[in-house]
Image: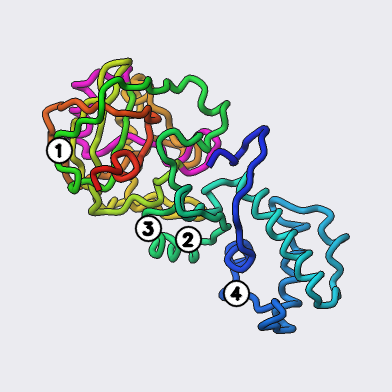
Amino acid sequence: MAIPHATGGRFYFECYPHPALIGLFDLDRILKYKKRSYNEDDWIRLINSVRSLASEEFPIKNVRDYVPAGIAHSKTSEDMLDSIVCAYIAAYWWRFGVERSSLIGDLSSGYMVTPHNSCTVERLEHIFRGRMNMVRPGTPSPIPQSANQGVPSSPEADRPASIRTEPSKYDWIYFSNESKWNLDGFCEFVSEQKLIVRTIHNKARIPVPNVLQLKPGERILLVYKADRKPHIQLFACTIGQSPNPIRSDRHLFDAFSRIEGRFEDMLTEAGFDTDPVVGGFTGIYLSETEDLHRAEIDLRKPVPMMAIQRWADVFPESG
């Protein structure tokens, strides 16, 4: 997750050409070009697809110099095409991040990266729900450093975690850090408008980790952090189905709504950002909120502010 837009470093991850080709070229099935299940038409389709990368939005300009239109099938030519596809998967992940690819799995059991399209991302999310695009505490942010400037970090806490709510009630935890907006104003807005102010995309125009995984009916614990004071749990929130879900070129964010223009001056003054892709203020739509009387939460590890994280990733001991 540190790769997108990185300006240096050495990285590696596992990838597989079959699902990648479906995502990259909007195929309706895998291509049978391997020796064990070889199909001549699929081999030609693969060659033409790889050659078409010369004119894509993110091109390999000289790819046709290395992949002739009539290249004969052999294990050597298979390996060459696979190597080009895998290198392109890496470049594609660096260029577009989670906007056009998905990271599936985790550091403990293994993971891979694959480009997706609108069809495959829905199926991947259904099958691997909870194990996609995961950013654990302490994991480098996928946002470029330039986009992180001015975002305060969270100091290490001295005391162990102390949760005064029932862990099984929550799917997510959201750490807000809007110190320019006083606590009472923050609570009033969430309670009355049933919205958690949150951009969908970061300043690099990449979807924020986990925003695609938020689903109506799931529960979020909303936590407020101001300056260096303890984290304060404020609301147990249930995500609602947005009456006006937000669409981008590739995704439907059915848990998000645009925030009415009448709040624009107030949110700007409070220090919130507009979404760089949507072009206005956005928020997580809530069907209900429950005031938790501002009980404190202490964490063993620092957490990134303005982060949406799975409950089990922040508090694995809670199950």
Say which mark, if any, is on residue 30. Answer: 4
Residue named by callout 1: 165
Residue named by callout 2: 121
Name the residue nearer the viewer: 282 or 232.
232
Looking at the rendered structure, the kind of residue marked 1 is: Thr
Label 4 element class: loop
The answer to which of marks 3 and 2 sits earlier in the sequence is: 2
Looking at the rendered structure, the kind of residue marked 2 is: Val
Q: Quadrant of residue 124?
A: bottom left
Q: Which residue is drawn at 43% across and 32% down?
A: 274
- Start and end of the magenta stretch? 179-207
**Can residue 206 be found in the magenta stretch?**
yes
Name the residue nearer the viewer: 202 or 310.
310
The answer to which of marks 4 and 3 sits earlier in the sequence is: 4
| Residue 59 % position (x, y) | 74, 52
Looking at the rendered structure, the kind of residue marked 4 is: Ile
Q: Determine the CA span between mark 2 and mark 4.
A: 15 Å
Q: Is residue 193 left or right of residue 69?
A: left
Q: Which residue is drawn at 29% across and 40% down?
A: 315
Label 3 element class: loop
Say which mark, if any, is on residue 129. Answer: 3
Q: Which residue is drawn at 85% across and 77% down?
A: 72
